[in-house]
Amino acid sequence: MASAPRRRVAIATLAPPGECCPYLHEAVELVGKRWTGAIVYVLLEGGNMRFSEIGSAVPNLSDRLLSERMKELEARGVVERTVLSGPPVHVEYRLTEMGRALQPALSELRDWARRWLDEDDAESPAPAPARATAATR
């Protein structure tokens, strides 16, 4: 009698009970870093975008911090940077296949936030938005 084909088991399910999966932890740290999730979401919605367009779409994000995050995302393979010849020469950013694969997770997180962090929800009011300071710009 032939046995059924073995099912692939996601690595995340192999973490011992009570321990955080290292892959999940790394993913949350990457996307959950200040401004990074918003940047990826804006690129999911906007497609190819210039630096200034991304900056305009994410309120209170300084150019210095946007530049830092874009370099991090490019180094991790989430974002691709393309220099387009001019005149004038300009740079566009777009999500790679890896970056686009975050769409379902970010959509679910957005839906969760709309449900649980709704400002009109009297049971659990949303936290006040953080002020941009020199340290966060």
Image (spheres, grey):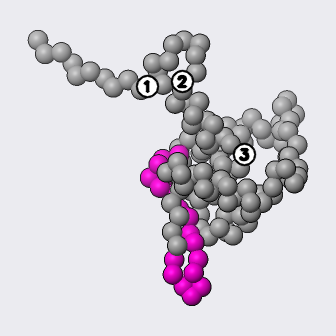
Residue nearest the viewer, comparing 44 with 70:
70
Cα–Cα span, label 2 and label 3: 21 Å
Left or right for 137, reference 10: right
* Quadrant for the N terminus in the image: top left
Residue 37 pos. (x, y %)? 65, 47
User: Rounded to the nearest whole Å, what is the CA distance between mark 1 and mark 3?
Assistant: 27 Å
Q: Residue at x 69, y 70 (%)?
A: 52
Residue lying at the far left in this picture: please name it.
Answer: 1
Q: Position of residue 91 (x, y in %)?
A: 57, 72
- Badge 1: how crowded within 10 Å, few (<14), some, or many (20+)? few
Q: Is residue 76 above or below residue 64?
A: above
Q: In the image, what residue occupies the spot 83% across and 38% down? A: 126
Against 119, is 83 above or below?
below
Secondary structure beneath disc 1? Answer: helix
Few, some or many residues within 10 Å of mark 3 (<14, 14–19, 20+) = some
Residue nearest the viewer, comparing 103 with 63: 63
Camera-side residue of 78 and 38: 78
Amino acid tagged 2: Cys
- The magenta span reads 84-102
Q: CA distance from mark 1 to mark 2?
A: 8 Å
Residue at which label 2 appears? 21
Q: Taking the image as drawn, is residue 5 in sight?
A: yes
Q: Which residue is mark 1?
A: 11
Q: Position of residue 79 (x, y in %)?
A: 53, 56
The three-letter code of the residue at mark 1 reads Ile
Name the residue carrying label 3: 34
Callout 3 secondary element: loop
Label 1 with label 2: CB-CB less than 8 Å: yes
